[in-house]
Structures are given as structure tokens and as C-alpha cells.
């Protein structure tokens, strides 16, 4: 009987554990997002410096395009978990808004499971890419930039996103914080 009380989601013990997990997920996803923001800032600095090098000194960097593309991909996958945690991703809600609470819960769970399935398939393929990249020591063509850290960002970001989406199925429904009203006179 004691074990049943510990696993009951309505008990204080389970709620405290769930809250700790929520906080850990939030902190980890914020760390990933911070790395994504650093990637964007680095990309902006790199491109700005490349422009100066090209037009002021006549000597452009050979690696700007490759590195900025890798940083952009990293940014997307590193910020994805945080976007899912704060519930600011694209979601089709037009029909769901008219549902009752139970139907909304079911629709939310189905949507999350679809994303989890996508994340699982993507992760399995990305993990194979990580292993292949590590085994061959793959690099970009022109600048010879090591690909392993960037490919690893994809795998880690989508894995964390899938785990977050799975966890959210068992948590209270997210509160919609954005209003999608039409602007005045909007069509």
C-alpha cells in the first residue's frame, strides 16, 4: 500500500518529483538554448567579419559559408527543446479549441506522440550519422571543419525534444499564452 501512495500522481511525493523533473528539463533546455544563441551570435560575428575582410582588406575567409551553415543548423536543433518546453512551437489548434477538456487532453497526447515518433526516427538516423562521422573523421569540403560537433548537436537536440514531448503527455495541459486574433480590419 505504501508503494501505491508514492506512485499516485495526486500525492505530494509524486508532485514534488514531477516538479523537480520539470525544473531539470527547463534548466537543461535553457542550456541548450543558450548554446543555440551563442551559435547565432557567432554566426552574425563571423559574417560581419567576413564582409569587412572581403571589402576592406580584399581577403575573404574561405570558411564563412560552411561554418555559418553549420552554426545555423546547430542553432535550430539546440533551441528546439526550449521552444517545446515553453510551448511556443507551431501547433494546429483551430478544431481543438472547441473540444472539451478530455478531448483536448487526448488530442494533445496524440500530437505529442506523433512528435515523439518523428523524434525517435530522426534520432536513430542522426545517431547513425554521428557514428559514421566519428568513424571517418568527416570534415567539410573547403575549410575542412570537423563535422562531429555539429552532427552531435542534431542528435542531442532532437533526442531531448522527444523526451520532453513524451514527458509533457503526463503533465497538465499547457496554457495558451498567445492570442491569435486578427488585427483591426485584417483579412
Image (cartoon, helix red, strand yellow):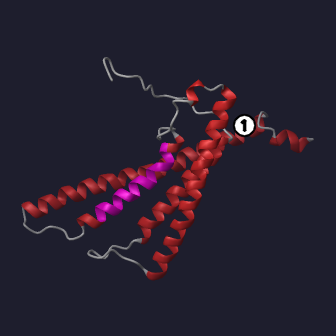
The residue at the point 60 percent across, 45 percent down is 112
Image coordinates of residue 177 in percent, x first then y, are 49, 28
Q: Local crowd at mark 1 within 10 Å, few (<14), some, or many (≥20)?
A: some
Q: Which residues are magenta?
A: 67-83
Q: Quadrant of residue 35?
A: bottom left
Front residue of this view, candidates 69 and 16: 69
Q: Quadrant of residue 53?
A: bottom left
The residue at the point 21 percent across, 57 percent down is 47
Q: Is residue 81 left or right of residue 62?
A: right
Residue 164 appears in the picture as rendered = no
Image coordinates of residue 41 in percent, x first then y, are 30, 52
Front residue of this view, candidates 41 and 124: 124
Q: In the rendered image, which quarter contains the N terminus?
A: top right
Image coordinates of residue 57 in percent, x first then y, are 7, 65
Q: Is residue 77 left or right of residue 25?
A: left
Magenta span includes 75: yes
Q: What main secondary structure does the magenta stretch of the protein show? A: helix
Give the residue pinned by disc 1.
15
Q: Is residue 96 above or below residue 78?
A: above
Q: Is residue 5 above or below residue 125?
A: above
Q: Residue furthest bottom?
A: 136
Question: Secondary structure under badge 1?
Answer: helix
The residue at the point 32 percent across, 17 percent down is 184
Amino acid at each position: 500500500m505504501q508503494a501505491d501512495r508514492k506512485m499516485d500522481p495526486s500525492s505530494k511525493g509524486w508532485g514534488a518529483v514531477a516538479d523537480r523533473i520539470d525544473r531539470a528539463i527547463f534548466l537543461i533546455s535553457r542550456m541548450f538554448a543558450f548554446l543555440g544563441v551563442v551559435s547565432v551570435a557567432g554566426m552574425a560575428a563571423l559574417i560581419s567579419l567576413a564582409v569587412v575582410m572581403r571589402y576592406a582588406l580584399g581577403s575573404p575567409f574561405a570558411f564563412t559559408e560552411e561554418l555559418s551553415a553549420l552554426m545555423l543548423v546547430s542553432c535550430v536543433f539546440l533551441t528546439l527543446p526550449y521552444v517545446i518546453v515553453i510551448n511556443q512551437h507551431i501547433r494546429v489548434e483551430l478544431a481543438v479549441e472547441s473540444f472539451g477538456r478530455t478531448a483536448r487532453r487526448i488530442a494533445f497526447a496524440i500530437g505529442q506522440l506523433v512528435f515523439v515518433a518523428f523524434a525517435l526516427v530522426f534520432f536513430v538516423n542522426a545517431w547513425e550519422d554521428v557514428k559514421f562521422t566519428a568513424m571517418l573523421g568527416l570534415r567539410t569540403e573547403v575549410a575542412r571543419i570537423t563535422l562531429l560537433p555539429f552532427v552531435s548537436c542534431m542528435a542531442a537536440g532532437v533526442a531531448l525534444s522527444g523526451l520532453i514531448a513524451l514527458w509533457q503527455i503526463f503533465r497538465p495541459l499547457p496554457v495558451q499564452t498567445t492570442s491569435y486574433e486578427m488585427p483591426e480590419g485584417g483579412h
